[in-house]
Image (cartoon, rainbow, N blue to C red):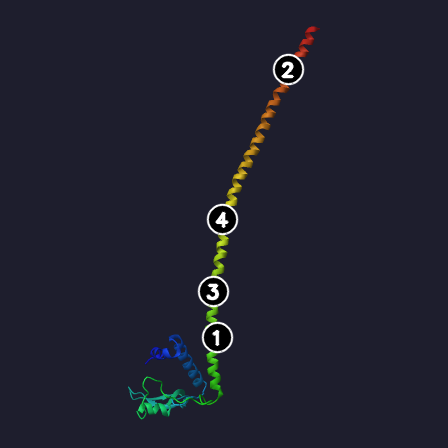
Amino acid sequence: MNKAQLVEAIADKVGGRQQAADAVDAVLDAIVRAVVAGDRVSVTGFGSFEKVDRPARYARNPQTGERVRVKKTSVPRFRAGQGFKDLVSGSKKLPRGGEVSVKKAPKGSLSGGASTRTTTKAAAKKATAKKTAAKRATTARKTVAKKATPAKTTAKKATTAKTAAAKKATPAKTTAKKATAKKTAPAKKATAKKAPAKKATARSTTAKKTATARKR
């Protein structure tokens, strides 16, 4: 049985596959963190997890038989509880269609001290905080996207309005120029008409002078 199959096996008991996956992840994460920190995690009737230090030693390569020096290291160890051993050996029978009768652990027996309980709570809080942060980030992105869309639409409308106003202003300027040209044209014609009047005055003056000379 792998992790996915384990999740499927307990999905109906915890209210769904997602809840089962979260529960399995939370339990495994708490156990790993406690063992890495040097604590002993003990589940009554099931077993205990602990960290074991191995000193530096010599070992043999199984393929070549060569003697090899192994450095000091730490390894995790699991020791099955008596109830687990009895069920595996067959001295006790598994209940049909029910849960294995594992005794409930008394208070403070899940680890060698209160540090593991604190670590477990901290791990659960971190997992909850990560989920909350992810939800907030997703909501913020959606909100920003919604706000950005009306802003773009407004900018496009403003640009279109400016273009339309510019187009309207251009005919108005053309009309003003035509009106100015019309006003200037009659003024020039009037000036041209006034010029012959001066010539007529000059002719009449010359005619008077000629008549006066003849009379004399």
Q: Amino acid at mark 4?
A: Thr
Q: Amino acid at mark 2?
A: Arg
Gap in angstroms between the C-alphas marked 1 and 2: 112 Å
SS at circle 4? helix
Mark sitting on residue 160:
4
**Residue 149, horizontal then vertical, whole percent:** 47, 58
Mark sitting on residue 129:
1
- N-terminal of the pair, mark 1 or mark 2, is 1
Asked if residue 198 is positioned above or below residue 96 in the image, the reply reads above
Q: Amino acid at mark 1?
A: Ala
Where is mark 2, residue-wise?
Answer: 203
- N-terminal of the pair, mark 2 or mark 3, is 3
| 10 horizontally vs 112: left or right | left
Q: Name the quarter where the C terminus is drawn.
A: top right
**Residue 132, horizontal then vertical, whole percent:** 47, 72
Gap in angstroms between the C-alphas marked 3 and 1: 18 Å
**Residue 108, horizontal then vertical, whole percent:** 47, 89
Q: Nearer the viewer, mark 2 or mark 3?
A: 3
SS at circle 1? helix
The image quadrant of residue 190 is top right
- N-terminal of the pair, mark 1 or mark 4, is 1
- N-terminal of the pair, mark 3 or mark 1, is 1
